[in-house]
Amino acid sequence: MLNKLGRTTEINQDIEGREVPPGQFVTDKFPVLSYGPTPEIDINEWKFRIFGLVDGEVTLDWKQFNELPQTTLDAEFHCVTQWSNLHNTWEGVLFNDILKLAQPKAEAKFVMLHCYGGYTTNLPLEIVQDDDVLFAHSHQEKPLEPKHGGPLRFVVPKRYAWKSAKWVNGLEFMAEDKPGFWEVRGYHNAGDPWKEERFSDDLT
């Protein structure tokens, strides 16, 4: 495989023969990595807002969100700090089911995830329409702990974990791309682990 600089990178395999992105090591642990403190979120006050280039804004409370179709899926999780956990069971609402509510306008090509605590991250709309992208409220058959992004975390298995935003409370549809929290601080805009897209100025 070629990385973003056109160099050949070796893809590792775990003991079960599953491929691991280059530069990653496999762990069964799930380290906690966050910028800033874990926000205290009152589930009775929790809101999820869908806005931007949509036909009509939608705001859901926790009860309404959990009345949406629920999906359970297994997915890998790759952190930019070089660890990968290959065995994760997530439960929540698929992005594509949220998309049915959102009814984005034709000019919407990107999304921005907004979170309690002020965190944001951006992604192309075509990427988050993969069938393994969801808003997760449970991990390994248990409610998602606050330190891991509970009550709701965005999960994008095919991107580095900073794109899987914690403490999500908003989804914005946009015509043009704009960088999120880590992207303006030098992280790669795309964040594809298979291409080692870690940092925008990574020349090593």
Image (tube, rainbow, N blue to C red):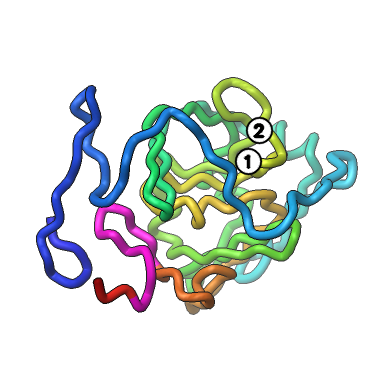
x 26%, y 40%: residue: 20
Which stretch appears magenta?
190-201
Q: Nearer the viewer, mark 2 or mark 1?
A: 1
Q: Which residue is mark 2?
A: 144
Residue type of the residue flagged with mark 1: His
Asked whether 137 or 201 is in front, the reply is 201
Are the two marked residues, 2 and 1, in contact with CB atoms closer than 8 angstroms? yes
Name the image quarter holding residue 121. bottom right
Quarter that holds the C terminus: bottom left
| Residue at image coords 46%, 75% | 186
Residue 108 screen position, x and y as percent = 51, 70
Magenta stretch: residue 196 in it?
A: yes
Report the disc number at residue 57: none
Disc 2 and disc 1: Cα gap in Å?
A: 6 Å
Left or right: 60 in relation to 141: right
Q: x, y percentage for residue 74?
A: 42, 28
The residue at which mark 1 appears reads as 148
Q: Main secondary structure of the magenta part?
A: loop
